[in-house]
Image (tube, rainbow, N blue to C red):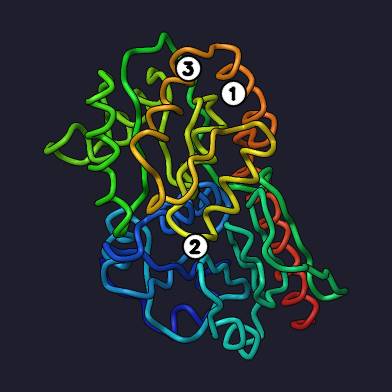
Amino acid sequence: MNTLTKREVAGSEFDAGIVVDAGPSVGYGHAVRCLRLARALIKRHRIVFYPLSEACKDFIESAGFPTTSGSAFPPLVITDLREVHGITAAIHRHGSKHISIHDLGLAQCYSDVAIDGSVTRLFPYSAGKNRTLFLGPQYMITREPVARQKSMETVLVTFGGGSTANLAQKITEELWRLGLTPVTTRGFIGSMPMTDEELTRTMATCRFAISGSGVSLYELLASGVPTIAIAFDRLQLRTADAFHERGAVLSAGLMDRLSPATLARYCVEMLENRQLTERITQAGQALVDGKGLSRVVEIVRRQIWLTSQIRTFTAC
């Protein structure tokens, strides 16, 4: 697919642009989230991606979406970036409206609309007359909830992308010692990465899951999968503990402090305490209903409509 030129983007070729990054070091979760949003929007609108790396560009184009490296923007720009990024100022200088999507309670950038699907907050948010906030797990973009089926003696281990994926080995070895069959998002140990269909099937039939405390955790809760949450840093720990306090997961704490004995104790709880698993399943689905994508789509569509009205009014 040919990269689009600045002139095409600046000439209102698209209704909205999406800025995101992905790759082996940062993972692909943010890009997957943006692709879900883009697929829902293209039924009515024209979308272009602004990938921040070659790996992200290849990933987005392999999904069939156009990309550009141009600095000009469509009337509406959506960003999904973990860290504070100077692109907000560039978007506003261009006269475009900015929607920022976050998780982990990181909605701190000065976008026109901030959407943070986290169960927790890190910063005191203040909505002004020129800034709108949509906060809480009801806005987390997840996959469609998976219908649970008869459980098998498997445990889903999902730690997302990046360096955290390498830590799955420690967990799977402990599960084997407990007589359980671990299935990681890279498949059984030594096999090829799991396809989306395989992941859906595993989510439907696993006894429980062990997950990092990123977007995957929200997807598991929306699908009613009893889950042990592990944090890979202190930002994720806030999420794991917030869900634990609300009775939606068992939080095993930080990965680098997790002992085999502690993990074994949580696994036994999941296997033997049916009342516990039913309770955390109900609490998780009450917090994350899996409808976040449709809510975010409506927010974006309204902003696209508003920017079109501004352009029409200016033209008149």
Inspect the image, locate mark 3, and give the three-letter code of the amino acid beneath it.
Arg
Q: CA distance from mark 1 to mark 2?
A: 36 Å
For image coordinates 41% across by 25% down, the residue present is 267
Q: CA distance from mark 1 to mark 3?
A: 11 Å
Residue at mark 1: 281
Label 1 secondary element? helix
Q: CA distance from mark 2 to mark 3?
A: 34 Å
For image coordinates 54% across by 60% down, the residue present is 235
Mark 3 Cα-neighbour bin, 10 Å: few <14, some 14–19, many ≥20: some
Indicate the position of residue 232 as horizontal and vertical percent values: 42, 55
Residue lying at the far right of the rendered structure: 129
Residue 84: quarter of image: bottom right
Label 2 secondary element? strand
Indicate the position of residue 139 as horizontal and vertical percent values: 66, 48
State left or right for residue 204 relative to residue 276: left
Inspect the image, locate mark 1, and give the three-letter code of the amino acid beneath it.
Thr
Mark 1 Cα-neighbour bin, 10 Å: few <14, some 14–19, many ≥20: many
Please report whichever mark, 1 or 2, sits nearer to the chain's N-terminal start. 2
For residue 225, above or below residue 189 = above
For residue 189, above or below residue 274 = below
Camera-side residue of 4 and 297: 297
For residue 22, above or below residue 144 = below
Please report whichever mark, 2 or 3, sits nearer to the chain's N-terminal start. 2
Camera-side residue of 315 and 181: 181
Q: Which numbered marker is on residue 148? A: 3
Q: Nearer the viewer, mark 1 or mark 2?
A: 1
Label 3 secondary element? loop
Q: How many marks do you count on the picture?
A: 3
The quadrant the C terminus occupies is bottom right
State left or right for residue 219 relative to residue 137: left
Residue at mark 2: 47
